[in-house]
Amino acid sequence: MAGKPIGIFDSGIGGLTVFRSIAEKLPEYDYIYLGDNSRAPYGNRSFNTIHQYTWECVQWLFKMDCQLIILACNTASAKALRTIQQKDMQALDPTKRVLGVIRPTAEVIGKYSKTKEIGVLGTTGTVQSASYLLEIEKFFPDLKVYQQACPLWVPMIESGDYEKPEADAIINLYLYELMRQSINIDTILLACTHYPLIQDQIKANLSPNINVIAQGDIVAQSLANYLQRHPKMDGQLSRNGTKQFFTTDDTKEFDRHASRFFSAPVTSSFVSVTEFSCK
Ligand code: DGL
């Protein structure tokens, strides 16, 4: 059978933190990663814009023969996934699947906390959607969840400025705002796939007994479980262990970031967003 890869989508480089975990856990499958870097960040954009951009990227990944797509972006999962699953996909091809990262994370996050008080750091879009509050409540009704939006973090990470010493002040700003909501928070979820890129700096600015949880391994485990439960989908996916990378912006900059995540250097290809609007 011709290649039927798994598509992994993010607004930019953040989804690579999830892709790395998925590729480690399930190395035999073929993957196409698409980063919409030229339109990132999504986090401060309107519902309609996030939906439109995400749906365009999803359709492009379908054209590339992906059968199954992971939105490795919390903002897209919070703002666009439901409409894509319930409306857009029905009109297109209901046998294909698009999955997000919020539900699998909500299913397990309560297990990490002893105090039963956790913090969720995300983009403005993710926080305002209240998706984590609603989803976590279904699985851990006793858990107290405090949220904090961090609108300056994604632009700082996409631009590479997080590597500069001044980044610490911007990192601290939102950690302070979160931690002042409750002294009992013992677990912080990085509910934006860009944030693991600054995970060490985040940890360095917090008391050492606070767990800082990235989603990569959680999403990878959840995908492995999904494929086991859905043998028909699993049977359609090709397995040559290949990884292709596409970005809607500068490929060199993308490769520089992406190569840190994988053992071999990454060479991405450019795809113009003007291609997305051609029906
Ligand atoms: N990585 C995306 C997320 O998980 C970042 C969104 C953005 O582009 O602002 O939410």
Image: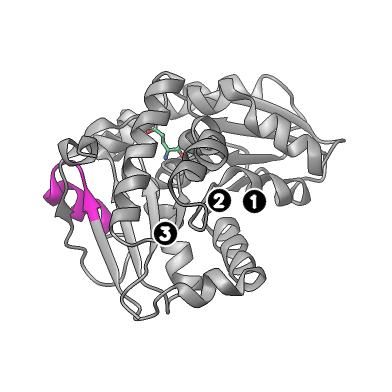
Q: Which mark is residue 104?
A: 1
Report the magenta residues as a range: 246-259
Q: Quadrant of the N terminus?
A: bottom left
Q: Is residue 24 visible?
A: yes
How are the colours assigned in the image?
A: one colour
Q: Which mark is residue 19?
A: 3
Q: Nearer the viewer, mark 2 or mark 1?
A: 1
Question: Dot 2 surroundings within 10 Å: few (below 14), some, or many (20 or more)?
Answer: many
Residue at (38% x, 37% y) in the render: 54
Answer with the quarter of the image where residue 8 lies. Answer: bottom left
Residue at (58% x, 36% y) in the render: 206
In the image, taking residue 186 as reference, residue 66 lies left or right, namely left
Label 2, label 1: how far apart the Cα atoms are: 9 Å
Mark 3 or mark 2, which has the lower sequence index? 3
Image location of residue 255, percent across then percent down? 19, 55
Of all residues, the one furthest to the front in this rendering is 91
Mark 1 or mark 3, which has the lower sequence index? 3
Q: Quadrant of the C terminus?
A: top left
